[in-house]
Image: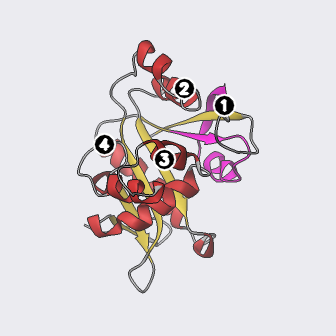
């Protein structure tokens, strides 16, 4: 079902055939960090992006087309995407300790967000920014959270992400920080920020 946001932008459920666009957008949302994980998951002659597309085609998992909503342009091409779902379980401390150092701060912040509707990915292709797509997707996430019985949204972003202004304008409040680990990854920021918004 397609939903028209308050801003008049149409949000619709993603399709499995959107996997390539979803993979591109998660790389944008994560400032390249997903490629670090995908590089470790390559099989045969796959590239890191092949892994991302494969994972986006799955029916389950934190990054799946089934958990994704998108905004399309007039030619039916994806211009913006949201991956969101209820965050129900904490990651046990031993599992965090065994994770790659670059991901430990993120797992620690996710543990603080358990019990919320979690926004794992939100990104818009550069050519389509400033048209209200991200705002529409955030409004859609809020509606999904509320109708699913959740009382808060959460998301994690870097301290230098310009989208912080959008989040804060929509009522998201910073609740925790963790230092960024840059092992095998280059990023201008120094801290991950956990944002939360009551719905």
> Which residue is drawn at the image coordinates 52% and 23% (left, top)?
108
Q: Residues within 10 Å of mark 2 (few under 14, many from 20)?
A: many
Residue depth check, mark 4 versus mark 1: number of the one nearer the observer: 1
The magenta-colored residue range is 155-179
The reply to whether callout 2 and callout 3 are in contact (CB within 8 Å) is: no
Q: What kind of element bears circle 4?
A: loop
The reply to whether callout 4 and callout 1 are in contact (CB within 8 Å) is: no
CA gap, disc 2 to disc 1? 8 Å
Q: Which residue is mark 3?
A: 39
Q: Position of residue 118 (x, y in %)?
A: 43, 39
Residue depth check, mark 3 versus mark 4: number of the one nearer the observer: 3
CA gap, disc 1 to disc 3? 17 Å
CA gap, disc 3 to disc 4? 18 Å
> Which residue is drawn at the image coordinates 61% and 48% (left, top)?
167
CA gap, disc 4 to disc 2? 19 Å
As displayed, is residue 128 above or below residue 154? below
Residue 90 lies in the magenta stretch? no
The reply to whether callout 2 and callout 1 are in contact (CB within 8 Å) is: yes
Relative depth, front residue between 134 and 42: 42
Which image quarter is the N terminus in?
bottom left
Q: Which residue is mark 1?
A: 181
Relative depth, front residue between 100 and 118: 100
Q: What kind of element bears circle 1?
A: loop
> Which residue is drawn at the image coordinates 49% and 62% (left, top)?
24
Q: Position of residue 180 (x, y in %)?
A: 67, 32
Going from N to C along the chain, the mark reached first, 4 or 1, is 4
CA gap, disc 4 to disc 1? 24 Å
> Which residue is drawn at the image coordinates 56% and 53% (left, top)?
29
Q: Position of residue 76 (x, y in %)?
A: 38, 81
User: What mark, if any, has residue 61 been given in the picture?
Assistant: 4
Going from N to C along the chain, the mark reached first, 4 or 2, is 4
Q: Which residue is mark 2?
A: 104
């Amino acid at each position: 079902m397609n939903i028209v946001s308050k801003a008049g932008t149409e949000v619709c459920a993603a399709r499995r055939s959107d996997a390539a666009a979803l993979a591109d957008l998660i790389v944008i949302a994560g400032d390249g960090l997903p490629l670090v994980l995908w590089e470790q998951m390559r099989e045969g002659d796959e590239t890191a992006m092949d892994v991302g597309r494969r994972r986006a085609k799955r029916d389950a998992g934190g990054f799946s087309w089934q958990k994704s909503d998108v905004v399309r342009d007039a030619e039916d091409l994806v211009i913006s995407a949201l991956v969101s779902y209820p965050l129900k379980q904490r990651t046990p401390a031993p599992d965090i300790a065994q994770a790659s150092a670059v991901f430990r701060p993120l797992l620690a912040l996710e543990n603080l967000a358990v019990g919320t509707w979690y926004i794992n990915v939100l990104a818009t292709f550069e050519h389509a920014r400033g048209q209200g797509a991200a705002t529409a997707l955030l409004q859609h996430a809020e509606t999904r959270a509320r109708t699913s019985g959740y009382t808060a949204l959460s998301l994690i972003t870097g301290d230098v992400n310009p989208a912080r202004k959008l989040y804060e304008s929509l009522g998201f409040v910073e609740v925790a920080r963790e230092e960024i680990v840059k092992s095998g990854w280059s990023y201008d920021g120094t801290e991950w920020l956990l944002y939360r918004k009551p719905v």
